[in-house]
Image: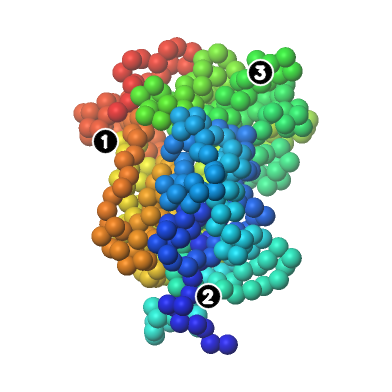
């Protein structure tokens, strides 16, 4: 069967999460045909997986304007813009209603994308490549295989399904897979009785230094203070040392809930509910004679046994199904090459990320875009508002409105996270030492209040 002409085809959006559905809303607003392919059985599969976790962005910051425009005629009432939704709230009260408005004929569930290419062209073939439609292989929930043609592809599949391992090398630690029954890679729901009993009264290692790790430490501290949590203890494993940037921006963060997470993590340490182990890069996970887990560092250190391990070392994009496309990705972040310098945590640990759109997200393969969390690759600093601006710009470009595509329509709050050298414990640069964007970070003494000079940007 010959492929139809690209001009007669829809834009295929991969993923019915926040960025994917926002992309669909903007395409609808522009009068462009589209099809959303979602692997899960409903909208917002990933937020539903962390339904118990509260966002550090308010409702006013996680509802896309084009989506709100579509929802308004249905009688949908926007939640209080100043309140903070959980992942479950976000999925149930916004994402699913939005998907319902877009319609089942344009949002297909149980449709997992397993491959994307150009029709009749693998990645080696140059001839007439840009004139061929995209070919998307889809596996349905009942195991059937289908193919879908598209004029453009917007990949908003996120990074939730591919957690980074405990091993500091980026590979699984020796013994990590064998210890899978005692390891989780997401923040546990301690309101679930079965999950709560798994951690209550136990010693749990939390590996990671971002917002998810802060959340897990705060949850475990709350459990330790509860009637059924006596003896609960967290061991916080950090690959870096502790400085003024470790706990985020605190009260200086323009997203207050994000700042509060860092303060909660610090409180967990200061009150003795968590012990911090710094400069520890996990090399192996072993079992002792009682079946408990022993973490072994690259420097030979062996930590006291723990009952459970929560690995929150970040997420990474699944690029396997895009292997036949010519993507231009940064060799470190796996983000689009023009975007990577703007978000690289090895260079940027404070201030705002410059709003960006179709130009920064372009690839050598024309009309394919990675958006939302996936566009950031391994960088951890993504905000929903950024994704909404991305897809607004892309939809404008696909509609032929280049002026709107290149116009910036977003102002981001400052992160309030300052100092440090990004992901690793490298020496401070001259700019950081002299102030630059932020003051030189002070060292935080565990168990003592943070000095006033660590207030952020």
| SS for callout 1 | loop
| SS for callout 2 | strand
Residue 238 numbered tag: none
Left-right relation of 318 to 191: left
Q: Position of residue 367 (x, y in %)?
A: 40, 68
Disc number lying in front (1 or 2)? 2
**Residue at the spot x=67%, y=55% of the render?**
41
Q: Quadrant of the C terminus?
A: top left
214 vs 352: above or below: above
What residue did someone put label 2 on? 149
**Residue 113's image quarter?**
bottom right
What residue did someone put label 3 on? 224
280 vs 383: above or below: above
Q: Residue furthest bottom?
A: 1
Q: CA distance from mark 1 to mark 2?
A: 49 Å
Q: Earlier in the sequence, mark 1 or mark 2?
A: 2
| SS for callout 3 | helix
**Residue 445's image quarter?**
top left
**Residue at the spot x=59%, y=48% of the render?**
96
Mark 3 Cα-neighbour bin, 10 Å: few <14, some 14–19, many ≥20: many
Q: Earlier in the sequence, mark 1 or mark 3?
A: 3
Q: Position of residue 114 (x, y in %)?
A: 60, 67
Q: Earlier in the sequence, mark 3 or mark 2?
A: 2
Q: Which one is nearer the viewer's eye here, 17 or 69?
A: 69
Disc number lying in front (3 or 2)? 2
Residue 283 visible from this viewpoint: no
Left-right relation of 366 to 68: left
Q: Position of residue 320 (x, y in %)?
A: 54, 63
What residue did someone put label 1 on? 429
């Amino acid at each position: 069967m010959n492929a139809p002409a690209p001009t007669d085809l829809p834009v295929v959006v991969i993923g019915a999460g926040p960025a994917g559905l926002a992309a669909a809303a903007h395409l609808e607003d522009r009068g462009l045909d589209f099809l959303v392919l979602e692997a899960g059985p409903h909208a917002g599969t990933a937020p539903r997986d962390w339904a118990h976790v509260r966002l550090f962005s308010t409702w006013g910051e996680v509802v896309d304007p084009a989506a709100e425009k579509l929802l308004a005629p249905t009688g949908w009432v926007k939640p209080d813009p100043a309140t903070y939704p959980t992942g479950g709230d976000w999925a149930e009260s916004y994402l699913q209603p939005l998907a319902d408005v877009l319609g089942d004929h344009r949002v297909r569930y149980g449709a997992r994308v397993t491959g994307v290419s150009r029709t009749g062209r693998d990645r080696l073939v140059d001839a007439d490549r840009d004139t061929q439609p995209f070919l998307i292989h889809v596996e349905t929930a009942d195991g059937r295989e289908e193919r879908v043609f598209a004029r453009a592809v917007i990949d908003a599949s996120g990074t939730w399904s591919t957690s980074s391992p405990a091993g500091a090398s980026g590979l699984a630690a020796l013994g990590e897979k064998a210890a899978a029954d005692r390891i989780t890679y997401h923040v546990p729901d301690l309101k679930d009785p079965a999950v709560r009993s798994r951690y209550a009264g136990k010693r749990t290692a939390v590996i990671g230094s971002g917002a998810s790790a802060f959340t897990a430490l705060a949850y475990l501290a709350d459990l330790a203070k509860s009637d059924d949590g006596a003896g609960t203890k967290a061991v916080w494993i950090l690959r870096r040392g502790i400085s003024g940037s470790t706990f985020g921006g605190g009260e200086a963060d323009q997203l207050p809930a994000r700042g509060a997470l860092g303060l909660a993590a610090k409180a967990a340490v200061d009150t003795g509910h968590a012990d911090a182990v710094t400069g520890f890069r996990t090399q192996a996970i072993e079992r002792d004679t009682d079946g408990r887990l022993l973490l072994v560092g690259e420097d030979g250190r062996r930590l006291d046994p723990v009952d459970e391990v929560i690995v929150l070392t970040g997420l990474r994009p699944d690029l396997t199904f895009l292997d036949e496309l010519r993507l231009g990705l940064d060799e470190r972040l796996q983000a689009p090459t023009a975007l990577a310098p703007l978000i690289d945590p090895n260079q940027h640990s404070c201030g705002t990320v410059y709003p960006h759109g179709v130009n920064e997200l372009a690839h050598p393969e024309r009309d394919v875009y990675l958006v939302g969390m996936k566009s950031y690759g391994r960088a951890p600093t993504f905000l929903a508002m950024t994704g909404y601006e991305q897809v607004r710009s892309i939809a404008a470009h696909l509609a032929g409105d280049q002026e709107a595509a290149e116009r910036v329509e977003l102002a981001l709050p400052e992160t309030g996270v300052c100092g440090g050298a990004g992901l690793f414990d490298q020496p401070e640069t001259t700019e950081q030492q002299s102030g630059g964007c932020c003051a030189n970070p002070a060292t935080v003494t565990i168990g003592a209040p943070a000095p006033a000079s660590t207030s952020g940007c």
